[in-house]
Amino acid sequence: MQQLVDAFSRKFFYLRLSITDVCNFRCTYCLPNGYKPNGHKSFLSLDEISRLTQSFAALGTEKIRLTGGEPTMRRDFTDIIATIKDNASIKKIAVTTNGYRLSRDVAQWRAAGLSAINVSVDSLDPRQFHAITGQDKFSQVMEGIDAAFTAGFEKVKVNVVLMRNVNDKNLPDFLNWIKDRPIQLRFIELMETGDGSDIFNRFHLSGEVIRQRLLNEGWLQIPRARSDGPAQVFTHPDYQGEIGLIMPYEKDFCVTCNRLRVSAIGNLHLCLFGENGIPLRDLLADDSQQEALQQRIQGGLLHKRETHFLHQGDSGITPNLSVIGG
């Protein structure tokens, strides 16, 4: 099997595949004014997703995360999971979701082959949750997380976008929540996007604040597996849950990069920030183009930069995190 490798000898085992940029939430840091259709673009079809993931699997991809927008808004979401599951080379299929359909459908997704779930929950206060997301669905999302455990998932990851003077003071509540639950709570530093500079300047907070507190309270960092995401994960003997920190502004964050992104319209993005993307969709029309598709993917990696330039305030062409499955 070939393996995707860039000019800096980084190996890529992990694909984040956006299947829609439509979202029904209006999170303050992403889509505060709600989703606005941009033209008449169509998202990748089930057949196109099948061919795309087959090519990535042939190039050594072991893990695929389905993202959006909100990926579960696709009516064929379960079929997408099952199609990817048919490829034995893909060892893990994950989803990042706002959780609003979990309680209804999570058992069906697991049966189709879903193996990991990340749910976005930026506050454990229902009123604050409503203020951040624009949706009064806190109870529904909590029920969905419970349903995931009932369906057989041994762990659920919960994403929290860290925001100064919004949820940074609530660490004790979050820790209490995971004390007896197998939840990996992941604090993600707020990232600057083209449309979000004002919000970034108001609310950005370094994850170092959380890390120092964890270390002072006896939490220990554990090693990353090769297809893991960028989180620094910490455990504590008194807690069933874990804490993850995703800190894109930390020095050398990009050294361990092992993931690529494909947008919902079929563009390969070598980084969440900074470039227009490499079109792949013209090579997804039929099975005869698989070799050319693999060559384009591998060739594109030669242009992957050593690092992002978020430190300089350069978020590239990315207007918001919904566009390429942030």
Image (cartoon, grey):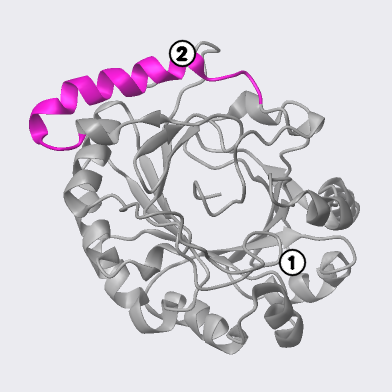
Give whichever of 286, 219 is nearer the camera: 286
Left or right: where does residue 156 sit relative to residue 50? right
Position in image of residue 313 (x %, y %) = 78, 34
In what element is the residue under mark 2?
helix
Image quadrant for the N terminus? top left
Q: Which residue in the protein does label 1 denote?
A: 238
* Tag 1: amino acid: Asp
Of the pair 284 and 148, the residue shown nearer to us? 284
1 vs 2, front mark: 2
Disc ID at residue 302:
2
Disc 2 crowd, CA 10 A, few/some/many (<14, 14-19, 20+): few
The secondary element bearing badge 1 is classed as loop
* Residue visible at 41% across and 19% down in the picture: 300
The residue sitting at 60% across, 30% down in the picture is: 274
Kindly report the secondary structure that dominates the magenta region of the rendered protein: helix
Quadrant in which residue 311 is drawn? top right
Q: CA distance from mark 1 to mark 2?
A: 46 Å
Which of the 4 quarters of the picture holds residue 161?
A: bottom right
